[in-house]
Image (cartoon, grey):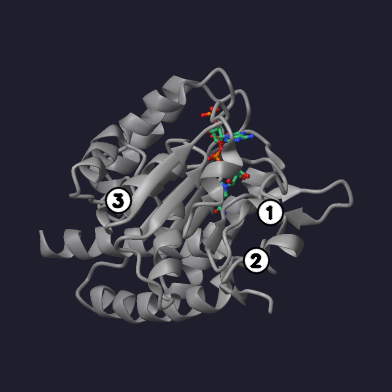
Amino acid sequence: MPAQLLDGNALSKKIRSEIAARTAIVTAKGVKPGLAVIVVGENPASQVYVRNKVKACEDVGFYSILERYPEAFTQAELLNRIAVLNADPDIHGILVQLPLPIHIASEKVLEAIAPEKDVDGFHVANAGALMVGQPEFKPCTPYGCMKILENIDYPIRGARAVIVGASNIVGKPMAMLLLQAGATVTICNSKTRDLAHHTKDADILVVATGKPKMITGDMVKNGAVVIDVGINRTPDGKLCGDVDFDAAQYVAGWITPVPGGVGPMTITMLLMNTLEAAEKYSKA
Ligand code: NDP
């Protein structure tokens, strides 16, 4: 029996219609949620991501702006733009698409975004707030993974959760969210010894390494929930995850496909964070 498919497109559609309804309410109060997306350089994947984000904003009724700058844009120029957007009352969320060109220090840029407009949740103030269990904005990808988990009848509380990947934008915040939901959490990285020993013990397995199909079917526990964050392009131009889906689907109880699993949820939670920023602004 193959695993039940965790359909991120269907769940996204449901959440985005709730977001559209709340957007109409806050807009009627005079605050239209506004997102500014900045992209620097010509990274083709980034260009696709920012276009998708802006399109998603339009679909739910947000105001959005997309600022594109050439590779040679300086750090000082970028910081100036962020300062202007921080002060713009029509903008409630600011997103700087990563990766930035190497002459720009990403951490300086992320910390220049006003924490109340940091809808990606990457500012150290927001990362710290998440750590102590009082998140303002949860980083969009782990937030989307949590929504996927909450949407199935599977108890997170008391479950053994294993996260493969420990980045600041996925693995670490994912661990915090699962811990706060009552799971017993293990975080693995590239130095972990006997990775399969950990993954085979996972009731909930979240994989975010950027290594195509590195989690094979025999590394998955029978009946586990498998959330595959990875987005990789195969030599024939197709997308695949960090989990070997074809094999893992016959072992897992639930599994996310790639594409169509976590990806759409990431954008949906960006919309949710921006909406919530606007709602807070409307009450301030
Ligand atoms: P990073 O490269 O920043 O981090 C990768 C992490 O995986 C690191 O902690 C690294 O360990 C760990 N890792 C790498 N190889 C192994 C291995 N063989 N065994 C165990 N751990 C390993 O990646 P991101 O977190 O930014 O992204 C991960 C993947 O998720 C990528 O495919 C990316 O495209 C995708 N992604 C998808 C999103 C979506 O919306 N679906 C959003 C964001 C990312 P170490 O710390 O030791 O280096």
Residue of label 1: 218
- Residues at circles 1 and 2 in contact by the CB criterion of under 8 Å: yes
Q: CA distance from mark 3 to mark 1?
A: 26 Å
In the image, taking residue 1 as reference, residue 32 lies left or right, namely left
Q: Earlier in the sequence, mark 1 or mark 2?
A: 1
Please name which of the two marks, 3 or 1, marks the residue nearer to the observer: 1
Q: Is mark 1 within 8 Å of ligand 1?
A: no
In the image, taking residue 169 as reference, residue 221 lies left or right, namely right
Q: Residue at x 44, y 40 (%)?
A: 187
Q: Earlier in the sequence, mark 3 or mark 1?
A: 3
Three-letter code, disc 1: Asp
Q: CA distance from mark 3 to mark 2?
A: 25 Å
Q: Which mark is residue 179?
A: 3
Q: Residue at x 35, y 70 (%)?
A: 155
Q: Which mark is residue 251?
A: 2
Three-letter code, disc 3: Leu
- Crowd around label 3: few <14 · some 14–19 · many ≥20 (10 Å): many
Q: Nearer the viewer, residue 225 or 61?
A: 225
Q: Residue at x 68, y 79 (%)?
A: 1
